[in-house]
Image (spheres, helix red, strand yellow):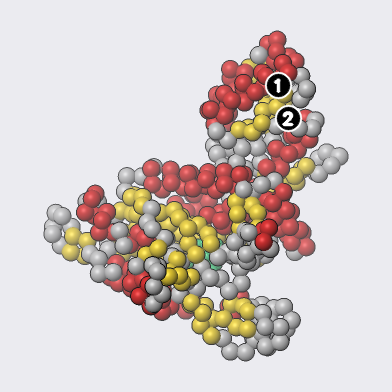
Amino acid sequence: MEKDEKLMEKITSLCKRRGFIYPGSEIYGGLAGTFDYGPLGVALKNNIKTLWWKKFVDGRVDMYGVDAAILMNSAVWQASGHVDTFTEALVECGKCHKRFREDHLKEKGKCDECGGDTGLSRKFNGMFKTQIGAVEDSSSTVYLRPETAQGMFVNFKNIIDSFHPKLPFGMAQIGKAFRNEITPRDFIFRVREFEQMEIEYFIKDEDWEKYFEYWKDEMLAWMEGMGIDMNKVHELEVEKEDLAHYSKRTIDFEFDFPFGLKELYGLAYRTDFDLKSHNLIYQDEETSSKIVPHVIEPTFGVDRTVLALMLSAYTEDNGGIETRPYLAFKPSVAPVVCAVSPLLKNKPELRDYAHILYRTLKDEFGRVMWDDNGNIGKRYRRQDEIGTPWCIVVDFDTLTDDTVTIRDRDTGVQERIKKVDIIDYIKERMN
Ligand code: ATP
């Protein structure tokens, strides 16, 4: 446990120091439950989202992508059940007045902080409320969406009218969601503003078990493909009494985080609950029969993916004199694909050559870093720490034979290759 707690500390401090993730509004003392992604964090997050879209939208023939508004008519949240049931049981310690989600307490009725009595719970709605327009009355209340799912359901008819899809088909969306979490905690695991990647897959009701299994396999394949440590992933069949108001069956994919086994992703059979609530139907164009399709929903948190990936990739190489920490990201996921350096900073002929190479590689891969600070060993360390798979160095031999050294992050081995072969070398190894 001690080792694991240190791991969270290491990841959190690395994220801040190296420009992955900063506490939100930090110069004003922060804002609990919010984080800002820096350049490397944005790159990592963008890679996750791009790969997800590629696999689940562009890579398929039955998926329709949308990007719905975050603010929606409040009637949506009435119909979806969120106004009445998107609640948590909130308790407050009678002694230190700290607040907790009742189901998060280590011991029921006892404060996690001081051991005081928490007393009875009360319901707390997790949706953020705001006002739209200049006049503040009840008709102007809107909510920040607590899930992206409803943005898809309300566009179900639009997609049918524009594209005439046949069942089964899906809608997919990546976007922000907001929840007024009682106790945001564990870095980016439980925050108040986060991103989701969600799919609503519409099926005939008799097929739900088949597609539930199908999506379970797809989700597992995604995790494995991203480089999430599968030894740390566990499936939890959610008990009947714990199911969300819309679900008949849910599996949580839990990840062995240093702070416990916790939900990474979810897979829910939402039945026909949502389409029925919104009075939406599907008409089979061939038979003219009208049905209410059922829904399988695979849902993926972007921020929890970032954390699970960081934890899966973090490695300490103890083979040398000093411990060498590195992030063993797959090249397709890594924020930086390769770094380019001149061997010596103060030799213009090396710098000029390296800089032209840097621009060429940047045009090709985008995620390329220039690094000429300190000695080569230090540069390698810095790139290892942010998970850059390859470091390319221009030295005096380069000037005579157009070859460079390319160093592998995981093995530390350097190879000498021709400058003209660098792009193919990287592309062949990009997975
Ligand atoms: P939890 O039980 O941990 O509160 P949940 O069951 O309410 O989560 P879902 O409603 O299934 O979560 O949300 C779908 C996904 O969105 C989750 O699997 C998770 O990846 C992500 N998610 C949910 N709440 C948060 C949060 N507060 N911070 C970051 N990600 C979140």
* Callout 1 amino acid: Arg
Location of the C terminus (image quadrant): top right
Q: Is residue 88 left or right of residue 66?
A: right
* Callout 2 amino acid: Asp
- Is label 2 in a helix, a strand or a loop? loop
Q: Nearer the viewer, residue 33 or 430?
A: 33
Q: Which residue is mark 2?
A: 372
Q: Position of residue 150 (x, y in %)?
A: 37, 64
**Residue at 22% across, 61% down:** 282
Residue 413, located in which quarter of the rendered image?
top right
**Do the residues under discs 2 and 1 have CB atoms within 8 angstroms?**
yes
- How far apart marks 2 and 1 lie (CA) works out to 9 Å
Q: Is mark 2 within 8 Å of ligand 1?
A: no
Q: Is residue 419 left or right of residue 211?
A: right
Q: Position of residue 22 (x, y in %)?
A: 65, 54
**Residue at 67% across, 22% down:** 354
Q: Nearer the viewer, residue 14 or 348?
A: 348
Question: Most extreme residue toward the front, as rendered?
Answer: 134
For disc 2, the neighbor class at 10 Å (few under 14, some 14 to 19, many from 20) is many
With respect to residue 300, does 416 lie above or below? Answer: above
- Is label 1 in a helix, a strand or a loop? helix
**Residue at 68% across, 42% down:** 386
For disc 1, the neighbor class at 10 Å (few under 14, some 14 to 19, many from 20) is some
Q: Which residue is mark 1?
A: 351
Q: Nearer the viewer, residue 368 or 222?
A: 368
